[in-house]
Image: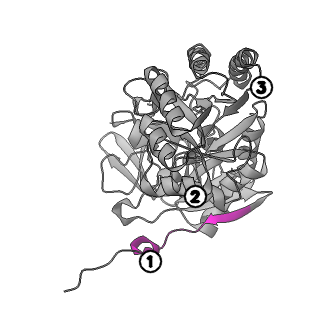
Amino acid sequence: MDKQSSLYSTLRTEIAGQLVSDLACQFGTPLYVYDAAKIVAQVESLKTFDTIRYAQKASSNLAILDLVRRHGGLVDAVSYGEILRALKVGFTPEGDPPGIVFTADIFDHDTLDLVVEKNIHVNCGSPDMISQLGERASGHKITLRINPGFGHGHSQKTNTGGEQSKHGIWHEQLNDCLQRANHCGLSVTGLHMHIGSGTDLKHLSQVCVAMEEMARKVGGSITNISAGGGLPISYHTQESVMDIEGYYRLWNKTRENLSAEFGHPIHLEIEPGRYLVAESGCLVTEIRAVKQMGENTFYLVDAGFNNLARPILYGAYHPMSICPSDGNENRPMREVVVGGPLCESGDIFTQKEGGFVARRELPAASVGDLLMIECAGAYGFAMGSNYNSKPLAAEVMVAHGQPHLVRARQTFEDLVCGESILPE
């Protein structure tokens, strides 16, 4: 059985000062609710870095992007759509550092066209990207994302370094890439190194050493280094809280070493995604059935992995809480399995990596009670799907004591928009 962290109560009636029952009544369930103040606090906690570049793949709602922009953050985009999202809320390609950076391992045709048209800075993750951009935009400044040959992460599926990862330019190919860039008239002004997630500063210090080594090979054209992202949050007591000050000291020392060697200032970026938004978000669901299956008691809710895929993908742990519909908080605890409505055996929120079902100790609950899946602001809605023809959930942001609908619930008309039936 999974023991829930003492950081999170198993009974909860409010989110950011709003009654959970009121939010569910007004906006329906399943429902994503974000606390704007928590996002702002996370941004502020990283202000020692020169630039905070939000990795919007974690959660790309326009309201979240705009909130980050208003508080001084810049943005990273990994697709055509994410570039357009960034432009829509007012991020600009201009600036030093640029307001928008496109980071990827390939260009699809539409994205390459957009990058050239809008003069978007590119963080190249493969040698072919350098050649393809150089053919269209000689004179462009680029960053290289380097795979140093090792990685780190809470799951093999989130480890972004080493030879098992598709991400980045293999460190042994750096010289070839520099020759490509020179041949195409591209200037390499920065290096980016992201190997996955974790809290082990000793391990992360290896990244700093690798960054210095790679930067020396590039030379004095370097004006910017990026520590990447992967900053964790505490989903569980078994996970450590990130030592942000220690992390900054490691990277600042690397920056200072390179500044002294090159004779000019080096700009230091960090690229958080999950760290900024995970703790702000909660997935509110309604318990629609309580079932006894042998020795297992199941709470079946109206959200499924179409709303939150992390448990089925990685066996990810999320704290959970119950909001009693009758207001009675005197509930005995019981061991339960929490699952969703989808026609799929893997539609279980309390599972370990590999698909092994786990029990969770939660208050006794009945049909009509609300269940909150906590720390769901990152890779929650962003990974949502229409599996089983389920509509995407609504999203609400609570700011300055007021809930704001920042994405309407998908309708059936939205669901089938663009589909057509063959003529007879």
Q: Sequence-wise, which precedes: disc 1 or disc 3?
A: 3
Q: Sequence-wise, which precedes: disc 2 or disc 3?
A: 2
Secondary structure category for the residue under label 3: loop
The quadrant of the rendering that contains the N terminus is: top left
Q: Which residue is the site of mark 1?
A: 413
Task: Name the residue located 73 percent from the left edge and 21 percent from the top edge.
Answer: 252
Q: Front-most of 315 and 186? A: 186
Q: In the rendering, at what x and y percent does residue 315 appear? A: 41, 36
Outermost residue, right direction?
400
Q: Which residue is the site of mark 2?
A: 117
Mark seen at residue 265: 3
Which is more foreground, mark 1 or mark 3? 3
**Residue type, numbered disc 3:** Pro
Q: Where is residue 128, by image quadrant?
A: top left
Secondary structure category for the residue under label 1: helix
Region of the chain picked out in magenta, as a range: 403-417
